[in-house]
Image: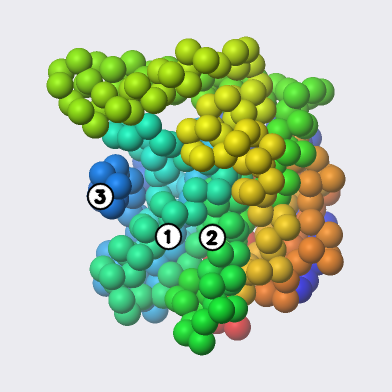
Amino acid sequence: MSYSTNIFKPPLLASNAHAQTLWRRFTPLAVFEQFRERIELADGDFIDIDWAGPAPSDSSRHRIVVLLHGLCGSSQSPYIIELQRELALSSVASVALNFRGCSGEFNRLARAYHSGVTEDLDEVFNILQEQYPAHHFLFAGYSLGASVLLNWLAEKGEQESHSTAVPAASTCRAVAVSTPFQLADCSRAMLGGTSAFYGDYFVKLLNRDFINKVEHLETLASLGNPLAFDAATTLRGLLNNAVDLTSIWRFDDQLTAPLHGFANADDYYARCSSGPKLKRINARTLLIQSADDPLIPPAALPSPEDLGSATELQLSDRGGHVGFIARGNRAWLEQQIARFLLSSD
């Protein structure tokens, strides 16, 4: 266990939490080449993954870094592309997983993704392991993707405690950035104050995407697609019964939770919060957080007592949410992640 503070130093003109949080969104990115692969899932749906850097066979020391994006993000999110670019400079292959429905194409089934959707990561990881059995896998997750990653690592740690075999995931390294460790606290934070700006932004995107998906599936259903008919019927039923979807909490309570087998938002938040599970993680894991994150209140951050022996928390006063644009170095976050993941110690 390690708990360090004030690692990150922002530039004077971007020391504000909101400037840090929004910086990547409004900064142009250079063209970067990715190669898409579609993973067909056992339940009939699919997940698209985007490779970057050298071919896996040419990757330095046979390493592959798996990246997980945040809420309403994708493999095209600036923080994903910037990390893939940084890893490519070290001749390391990386692959960005797009959660269901996030790759620019609607997924086939009613279900989508959420902060604890570990089964999709597990299925993709198992497929990648079969394709590249001699490779060493490393992981980086951001925000919601960080929550998924930590939940998954905790599950692997729990499995290891009941087995004499060592799962491959427990021997990896992982980095989680701007993790919402306590989902209920984070959801409540976005109901008021300046954090409400982000809550309003996300819930508008979520509502738009949900409605567009329903209409898309209904169109396919009208053409005789039975899979689309079942999915459209499920989603339309939820949408017709939903009331006042004006906050993340209401969206999760009326759509996310029932769609994915949770009783309500509180049940979803309790079961999928990664904070209480950190001690179960056996993989070497770095947590990068800022105390001024506008989406994650200080009360949601783990204390030193919450960390497991393999977990290190870097907590800085500044940095915003998935920001960490440093003084004279906009790639500070990417370099921190790459340094930890690729370290041989």
- The residue at the point 41 percent across, 36 percent down is 111
| Residue 305 in the image, given as x and y percentages of width and height | 84, 66
- The residue at the point 68 percent across, 74 percent down is 310
Q: Tag 1 or tag 3, which sits nearer the N-term?
A: 3
Q: Which residue is mark 1?
A: 122
Query: Which quarter of the rendering shows the N terminus?
Result: bottom right
Q: Secondary structure at mark 2?
A: helix
Residue situated furthest left in the rendering:
224
**Residue type (three-letter) at the residue carrying disc 2:** Trp
Q: Secondary structure at mark 3?
A: strand
Q: State the separation of the CA atoms marked 3 and 2.
A: 20 Å
Residue 161 appears in the figure: yes
Is the Cβ of the residue at disc 2 closer than 8 Å to that at disc 1? yes
Q: Tag 1 or tag 2, which sits nearer the N-term?
A: 1
Q: Quadrant of residue 119?
A: bottom left
| Residue 51 in the image, given as x and y percentages of width and height | 33, 54
Q: Residues within 10 Å of mark 1 (few under 14, many from 20)?
A: some
Q: Which residue is mark 2?
A: 152
Along the line of sight, which residue is nearer the eye, 101 or 59? Answer: 101
Q: Secondary structure at mark 1?
A: helix
Q: Which residue is mark 3?
A: 40
Q: Quadrant of residue 243?
A: top right
Residue 9 appears in the figure: no
**Residue type (three-letter) at the residue carrying disc 3:** Glu
Q: Quadrant of residue 257?
A: top right
Along the line of sight, which residue is nearer the eye, 226 or 300? Answer: 226
| Residue 291 in the image, given as x and y percentages of width and height | 81, 46
